[in-house]
Amino acid sequence: MSEKNREGKRTARERLADERAKQKAADKRRRTLIVGASVVCVLGLAAVIGVVAANSGKDEDKASGPAVAPSGAQGKDSLAIPVGKDGAKSTLTIWEDFRCPACMAFETAYRPTFHELTDSGQLRIEYHLVRLIDGNLGGTGSLRAGNAAACAQDAGLFRDYHDMLYANQPKETDDAFGDNGKLIALAGKVKGLDTAAFRSCVNDGRHDSWVDKSNDAFKAGHFSGTPTVLLDGKNIYQDQTMTPAKLKQLVQQANKG
């Protein structure tokens, strides 16, 4: 074999080795990002989803008309949808967006604990619905889903429909929730929800202005992103060791006290 051929083969081998090394490094970075994002979602450090108050002023299709709060809404300007008993010693305030992946990850991780604590009367949750993803990525899915959830509250089935929306959340960039038909179809999976009254409420956008008003309150609060979760007024994300078990312990301690 000539020296020229040997050099050509050596160079080809080196190029192949370089490409393999680059691919291996890229794969490692990709795995690190995936693992890191998963941990952040579970802990609720929502800055990763790019939902920043400074950008949330780009809301499209802002609803017009008076804000019509759903049945049973409470708090300042009736912007909170309560789940659990009023007499619970602990209150969890959650600001969320149904298009938000971190919100879905948080709800999935904490849902069994939420259900246990609210059903036993130890915890009361106040849900505030916002539409930051609409403002950042365009579309109306956050607004439409928020309105539909408020319509479910009118029917006394907010929690079940709330969980159903997260169980069927599309990709963040997919505005599937902007289709009222999709939202009504999901209501068909919640016993007793798919009624003429619910469909009318969804299609008419009865609570659109209320969702926008809640979104304005979120921005006025200068929160950094969704989900924002406060336990008795304290942002539990300041404790990066927060887990469902630790939350349960804190709530149980409050009830003993």
Image (cartoon, rainbow, N blue to C red):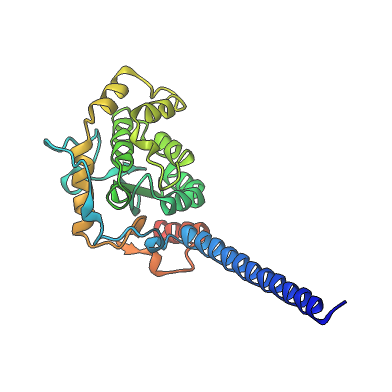
Q: Is residue 134 visible?
A: yes
Residue 257 visible? The answer is no
Dividing the picture into quadrants, the one containing residue 193 is top left
Residue at the spot 11% in from the left edge and 36% down from the top edge = 66
Q: Residue at x 35, y 55 (%)?
A: 226
- The location of residue 71, given as percent across then percent down, is 24, 33
On the image, which quarter does residue 171 sit in?
Answer: top left
Q: Position of residue 234 (x, y in %)?
A: 32, 64
- Outermost residue on the top side: it is 196
Residue at 44 percent of width and 39 percent of height = 163
Q: Quadrant of the C terminus?
A: bottom left
Q: Is residue 126 left or right of residue 41?
A: left
Q: Position of residue 69 (x, y in %)?
A: 20, 37
Query: Between 252 and 21, which is closer to the camera in this rendering?
Result: 21
Q: Is residue 184 above or below residue 15?
A: above
Does 40 appear above or below 108?
Answer: below
Q: How many marks?
A: 0
Locate residue 165, reporting x and y percent.
Answer: 42, 38
Residue lying furthest right in this view? 1
Residue closest to the eye, 85 or 226: 226
Q: Which residue is nearer to you in this view: 152 or 114?
A: 152
Q: Quadrant of the N terminus?
A: bottom right
Q: Would residue 115 appear left or right of 20 to someone viewing this image?
A: left
Residue placed furthest toward the bottom:
3
Q: In this rendering, is residue 2 above or below 129?
A: below
Q: Quadrant of residue 187?
A: top left
Of residues 192 and 16, the one nearer the viewer is 16
On screen, residue 112 versus residue 139, left or right, reads right
